[in-house]
Structure formats: structure tokens, C-alpha cells
Amino acid sequence: MFENLSGRLSDAARQLSGKGRLTESNIKDTLRQVRLALLEADVALPVVKSFIERIRERALGEEVGKSLTPGQELVKIIHAELVHILGDESVPLDLRVQPPAVILLAGLQGAGKTTTAAKLAKRLIDAEKKKVMLVSVDVHRPAAILQLQTLAGEINALHCASEPTEKPTAIVRRALDDARRSFADVLIVDTAGRLHIDGEMMQEVIEVHAAARPHETLFVVDSMAGQDAVNSARAFDDSLPLTGVVLTKTDGDAKGGVALSIREITGKPIRFIGVGEKVDALEAFHPDRMASRILGMGDVLTLVEEIEQKVSKEQTEKLARKLKKGRGFDLADLRDQLEQMMNMGGLTSMLEKLPLPGNVNPAALKDAANETMIRRQIAIINSMTPSERRFPKTINGSRKKRIAVGAGQQIQDVNRLLKQHLQMEKMMKKVGKGGMKKFMRGMPGGGIPPGMR
């Protein structure tokens, strides 16, 4: 998300290099570039106008600090305004009520309500140790009821069954009773949607809301829907007392205009963003972190949180003990590392959260971090025998041919993987034997960077 906008904003800021201070004349063209970048990113016109005006007011006549260039000063101002437009502060779910706390999800069909219900339930179960029940009142789409039941089984959530012949309000009342009897902490209600807003759908969701009396009412919206997303958010906000927004499919949205528009227009905070299809691909929304990501500064805090949540400490400690004892880094270890990387959304997801230097092309890095390639490497390792994974040097020409056929790959792919493993094995030996200092000395340029001694 925000790939196009990030590049355009960085280019605009660079135009101010060599200037002594920010003035009306030297920021005029830069602000025009920023305006065009925002419009191309599908940000609503009223939002663009107010955003540009606020930047102009803050920038004019502002002295540039000794440690900052005018371009950096403008980026600092843009960052502050982006944080403001995205909501200033993150707003976590408030579940401090008599259980069960009810969370109602509303939105158009295809926005991703059902998968969001499961993602949110998994997050509450894993991170907050809540007992969660899921229920679908989408009686118009039996497949949605079945989908939610299947997802509930995957994430170990409770599920309240429902039938297409029942009334949505009756389902909600029964689900509330079931949740109380099961001592559930949270009940998540997945409502029906339509391809477009109509009176019948809005009346139904209003009645369901009245029956459920939810503590949180979240509007789920497809981030790729552009201005239609903003218009539907406004319509739902007029009918329901929304408490927040969930943006879905942000991993497929290069523009990001909806995120910048929806908070400003509806006044409702963005609570979560969906960053993939997996049930754990839901991130809490932090305006300051997202503003940094938009400006190419990365989002290291979110990356660290993901590592803590998704990387197996047991596997990491096991590998560390193994290396310390002098045992080699074998192909089974490499497979474990590749699988953990995929659990975090792959290298592409990680690169989006890392601050990259201006001379580094993120697109080129993402091509190199192709997730399909990683999956193929895992398939090649799985095609080996346990003995071959433990002793890679025993893999001769005939074995390589068998492994390649078993994985559906070419012999060159097997050779490439073995070469990659050999390089990683050498690196791991340095870490295991001499610690980080020896490892750093072996890096290009040698020596330990200042501040890391």
C-alpha cells in the first residue's frame, strides 16, 4: 500500500535541496506535486485541499533547523499532517464491559467481512487470551454461514450455528444466549451485505444492531474500492453508530487513498488493516507508523511486534543451541527459516516495513524476494530424504535429478538452493564460533559499525 504515493512525495521533497528556508515561491511547485500525488492516490478532493492548505500554513517562513535540510523540514511537516489526517492516535478495541462484549461488522458484499471476523477473532484469542464466539446473520448467502463455521474451526473459536430460514434478529438473540452460557468473552456478529447500498439491507442491519446492542460497530471496507468506499462509509455512518473502520485487501492496494480519506470524512478511527489472505494477516492501525511507511521511513515497530508474535522462539533457541555446540546449519534448518519468513507474510511484507535508503529500488528488492521462489525452495528441500537434508554434501548428480523431479523444478534450481545453503552455513559458523564480532568483521567493509561495539 502507498507504493506510488511514497515515491511521489519523496521526489517532491527532493526538489527543495539547496534552499536556505521554506518560502512561498520555493514550496509552490513542491506542493503542486504533492497535490497531484494525493489525487493520483485516489484521496478525496476535499481532503486534498485541506491537507495542502495545512502544510502551506505550517511551512511558510519556518526556519530550517541546523540539522535539517528544507526538504527534510517539509517531510517532517508532511509526516505530522499525515498522522493528523490518519487519526493522530491509535484507538484499540474497548472490551471492558460485562461479557460477552459484542462486535458487529457491517459493510458491502465482497469487502471481506467474513474473513475479517475470523482474523479479528484469532487476534483476540492469541494476543488477548479471549474466548470468542462467531455468528453469521447473512441469511441471504448460505455460503457465508458455512465459510464462517469453517474458519471458526481453524482458529479454535466458538461458533453459533444459523440457518438461511431464520430471521437475522432471532439468530443474534440466540447467539447472545449461547455466548453467555459458554462464558464467551466476545461475540463477533458478521452481517449481510449487498453489492451496493439499498434500503432493505440498511433496514436489516439497523434491526440486527438494535437486537445485538454491540459495544463496537466496525465498518469493513475494501481499500481498493476508491471513492466508492468513502461514499459507502458515509452512508453506513448515517445509519449506524459506527465506532471504527477496518480496511481490507491493503496488500493489493498500491494507492492507499481510502486510508487517507475515510478518517477525515467520517471522523471514525481506522482500527485494523487486512494485509493478506491468511487468518493472522490483520494489523492494528497506528497513524504515526502508517505515516512513516507512506514517506518511506519504514515501520520497524510493527515488524518487531510481528517477529515476537509469529517467529517460533522454540525453533530459534534450538538453532542457537545447535550452532553453539558446533553442529552445522543443515537444509532442515534452512527450511524452518524459510517457513517462518512465509509466516510473516514473506520478504515483501518485511521490506515494506523497513526504512530503505533513497538509492535503493524497493521494486527490485521485491522481485528478488519473490514468494513463489521461496515456496519452490521449500518444495525442493521437502523432496529430499532426511539424510540428504542433514548431509547436503552427499547430494550427487543422480540425487539432484530425483529431487528436482520430485519438486517439479529444474536441476539448476536445486544447484542454486545448495549454493545458497552453503553461503548461509558459512555465515552461521561465524556466528556460532566467534559470535557477532567475527561475523561483522567478515562483512563487506569489515569491522563493527560505530555504536555497536
Image (spheres, rainbow, N blue to C red):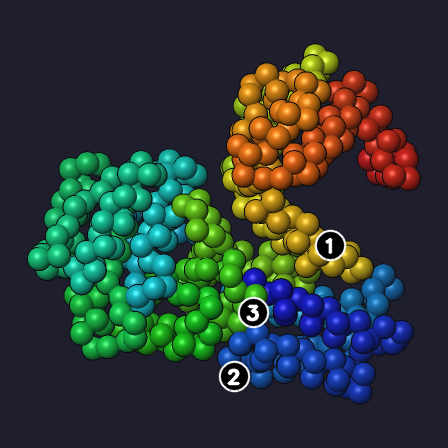
- Residue 385 quadrant: top right
Q: Mark 3 points at which residue?
A: 255
Q: Mark 1 points at which residue?
A: 356
Q: What residue do we see at 31% from left, 36% from top?
A: 156
In the rendered image, residue 180, in percent from the top left (x then y), is placed at 18, 41
Quadrant holding the C terminus? top right
Q: Mark 2 points at which residue?
A: 46
Quadrant holding the N terminus? bottom right
The disc, 2 or 3, on the residue closer to the chain's N-terminal end is 2
The disc, 2 or 1, on the residue closer to the chain's N-terminal end is 2
Badge 1 crowding class, 10 Å Cα cut-off, few under 14, some 14 to 19, many 20 or more, is some
Q: Is residue 193 left or right of residue 450?
A: left
SS assignment at label 2: helix
- Residue 327 quadrant: top right
Viewer-side label of 2, 3:
3
Q: Nearer the viewer, residue 359 or 186?
A: 359
SS assignment at label 1: loop
Q: Is residue 119 above or below residue 256?
A: above
Tag 2: amino acid: Pro
Q: In this view, does 252 lie above or below 431?
A: below
In the rendered image, residue 303, in percent from the top left (x then y), is placed at 60, 45
Inter-mark Cα distance, 2 to 1: 32 Å
In the rendered image, residue 92, in percent from the top left (x then y), is placed at 44, 52
Q: Residue furthest top?
A: 325
Q: Is residue 51 visible?
A: no
Inter-mark Cα distance, 1 to 3: 19 Å
